[in-house]
Image (cartoon, grey):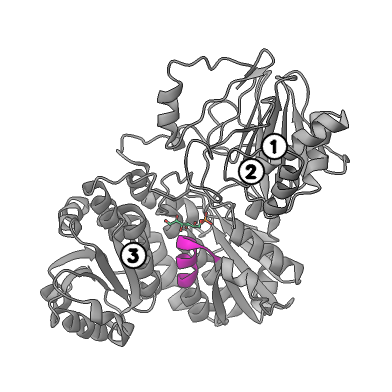
Amino acid sequence: MSQENSIKLYKCRGKVAELENYCFDKDISGKTGIAHTRWATHGEPNDQNAHPHLSEDGQLALIHNGIIENYVILKKELMNRGYIFKSDTDTEVLVHLIQDIYIHGECSLATAVRQALKEVEGTYALAILSADNPSELIVAKKGSPLLIGIGKDEYFIASDGAPIVKYTKKVVYLEDGDVATIHPDKPIAITNINNEVRHPYTEKLEITLEQLEKGGFPHYMLKEIYEQPRAVLDSMRGRINTVKDVVSLGGILEYESKMMQAKRFIIAACGTSWHAGLVGKYLFESLVRLPVEVEYASEFRYRNPIITEEDVLIVISQSGETADTLAALELAKGKGATVIGICNVVGSTLARNTHAGSYTHAGPEIGVASTKAFTTQVTVLALMALSLSRKKGSISSSYYHQLINDLESIPDKISKVLLQNDKIAEIAKFFLDKRNAIYLGRGVNYPVALEGALKLKEISYIHAEGYPAAEMKHGPIALIDEEMPTVVIATQQETYGKIASNIQEVRARKGKIISIVSEGDVNVKAMSDFFIEVPHTEELLVPLVSSVPLQLLAYHVAVQRGCDVDKPRNLAKSVSVE
Ligand code: F6R
């Protein structure tokens, strides 16, 4: 906080609410303020490592999202010049480096920032203010998201639109390499680090305040689980013709012939979006009859993958800001591949840097655990596969119509699953004292098993693993005993009989079975300690319904264990560091 030529610094470890409490009786008045929720990369989360970091003379304060990769060398040089470091962070080098130039170069702060950044390797979205010019803020971006909101006689900076939409919908997205000077009485001035001017382009945020509220739900996660019928409908809106015979995605139309001629598709994503990508593999291979590889974006980038101009890379990301996914995008683009995006956040880096793509239109997802992102990503993947397969002639018209009809019925089917919320909350009690769980599924339900396990572990801190059901006998079965809950997704599909045998194998070892079955199921239900029914759904689309009870299960287990569901420990909503 900067006022009257001095900087007041308030920072502490923990959640934003703790900082609010800490500042309750402090003087936080001032002209310009910067704040940052740090996700620890270098140095443990403690008061000292929290941002902002001050220059030695206390005249500069800086916040930073990203990683300074050459910070060890820079730190050594700065220490040789006499700078004393107070934190274990990589960020602190930035403020000393800028101060060093600012003092010695007799230049403006923006010039000092530009010059300092020439020496920096890594990623950053940073903001810096100086006590001697408290109305001015310098911000810079490379590899981490940053936008400037334009208010009346005021500006806001943020990583995305959600925190500032309350104040303004007019925004300027910074591009990589931008350094911007912000002053309430002046227009935004943007240059690159070589001081070449770039004219800011103003865009409109497409989110509403209402979308950012909990809407009467105790947690965002539960709200977002319940939003899925609407979110999936919005993903399909205007994309399925009312006479029900054409699926068309405007965003990729221009690239569809290129996609159909592709030698293969590569899907790159992280976490839940990667699980959606695995479902996409089943959809594209079955319907479009094209080979698909699904890659963890983080691994893809670093193994020198073979990519040609005949490949299509589909990148999937809710936030559109996941650093690993963006790196995969750039790599494939650089090698001439066509890059298609599936993304929720309008205006995000991914949406702006792909050749073409489709938004999921899920609305803002605030709960750290992805829920509606998954179902809407799968919906868009299904629409893409349908559109391409129809044009390619790789699908029969009867199957095409059958899938479209089923897709249209998904929102109602999800609503039916949600009616079982109370029953699922009861089943959750069984997990409360458990330390491990196994999730099993086959075919399209294998990614659902992975996703169910991820949901449980990330919000309830119970260790959980997803496995293809038949793989269990190759190792994981050794873990089964009466203490191990086994969640089996056994909707009626081709492998139903086989999965029933896997359940018997678990039961024979005293394992407890929690099954997800199709309505009217008899066999698996009879073998289960607990069961949850989901409506009958075309096999390829079943993840859209079978994933929902697993989201609710994880939610209730976490709530009953007293966990902070919306902000699980160690996790950030958008992973903008590699
Ligand atoms: C899990 C979860 C994460 C994200 C992952 C990718 O519930 O939310 O695994 O799915 O960090 O994020 P996006 O989709 O924003 O690229």
Of residues 456 and 60, the one drawn nearer to the viewer in this rendering: 60
Dot 3: few (<14), some (14–19), or many (≥20) neighbours within 10 Å? many
Are the residues flagged by discs 2 and 3 in contact, CB closer than 8 Å? no
> Can see residue 163?
yes
Against 173, residue 437 (above or below) is: below
Secondary element under disc 1, as helix, strand or loop, is helix
In the image, is residue 94 part of the stretch drawn in magenta?
no
Are the residues flagged by discs 1 and 3 in contact, CB closer than 8 Å? no
> Residue tagged by mark 1?
95
| CA–CA distance in space, label 1 to label 3 | 42 Å
Q: Is residue 363 shown left or right of residue 448?
A: right
| CA–CA distance in space, label 2 to label 3 | 35 Å
Q: Which mark is residue 297?
A: none
Q: Please tell me how many numbered marks the rendered image carries.
A: 3
Q: Position of residue 31 (x, y in %)?
A: 64, 17
User: Residue at the spot x=78%, y=21% of the render?
Assistant: 186
